Image (cartoon, rainbow, N blue to C red):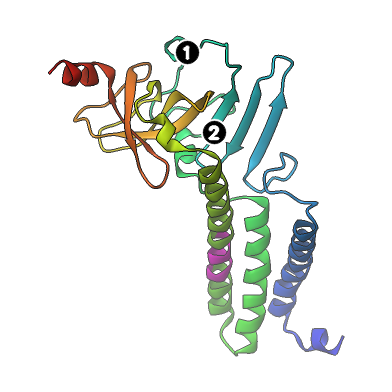
Amino acid sequence: MNWWNEFTQLQRIFATVAIPATIIMLIQFILQLLGIANEQDGTDIDGVDGTDVDSVDGADVDSVDGADMDTSIDLPDDYETDVSDLDSTFDDGSFDDDGTDVDDAHDGLRLFTLRSIIAFFAVGGWMGVAAIEWNLSSILAVILAVAAGTLAMYFVAWTIYTFLKMQQSGSMKYEYAVGKEGVVYLTIPAGGLGKVNVIVQDRLCELSAQTNSDRDIKTGEKVIVVDFTPDGVLIVEPKNLSEKKEIV
């Protein structure tokens, strides 16, 4: 333990934070390699809260919270659904049932999660130890530790977000949504993002959407999907506008 005795008091504080955080990170990594840990497991508060519900009538609900939350329900072939009957009380800046800010759901990037916080303490702690070893002042060491920890948080959050986006883009074929009628779930502002409910591949999906219209499309309005972006965002326009174009 000579190395510990050589540490200054501030270095010992940094190391006390960094060592257990690093051990937890290694355990998480090993469990991930073994397939025991899963980012989408609802018991892992890493910002990706997954829920898989199988009901008696065959409905399958998959929810990924924090990764551009797309929800899908498998419907039987003989089941008729009128998405216009969907009841929605959401609007811009509102909150969903569990108190989550809807705007955060659009971002999909969850910063304050278990994994990112552990990364903050591990990377920040070791940076603090190194800064003191470089004979930097205590104040500068703390600043560098916080900065390095914050960068680690962003990196972990971005990695999880990117991984989930890749998973979602591989399972959803957005071209099948083009031409389909849907209902606005969250108001789609002109030049901004909202949410729509639309049936794609026999599933009722809640997907991000934007519009080229010069006005906001309010919650409950019917829309037609005209295109989609490489990121999987649907491009929609009001149904009455599409009908007018067809008449012309």
Q: Which residues lie in the magenta part?
A: 147-153
Q: Nearer the viewer, mark 1 or mark 2?
A: 1
Q: Is residue 179 magenta?
A: no
Q: Is residue 241 above or below residue 18?
A: above
Quadrant in the picture for residue 44: top right
- Please tell me which residue is depicted at 76% across the width and 51% down the height of the picture: 37
The foreground one among 164 and 171 is 171
Q: How many marks?
A: 2
The foreground one among 51 and 132 is 51
Residue 185 at what x, y percent from top left?
42, 23
Quadrant in the picture for residue 89: top left
Residue 161 at what x, y percent from top left?
54, 51
Which residue does the numbered mark 1 point to in the structure image? Answer: 87
Q: State how far apart marks 1 and 2 are (Cα).
A: 19 Å
Q: Is residue 148 magenta?
A: yes
Which residue does the numbered mark 2 point to in the structure image? Answer: 100
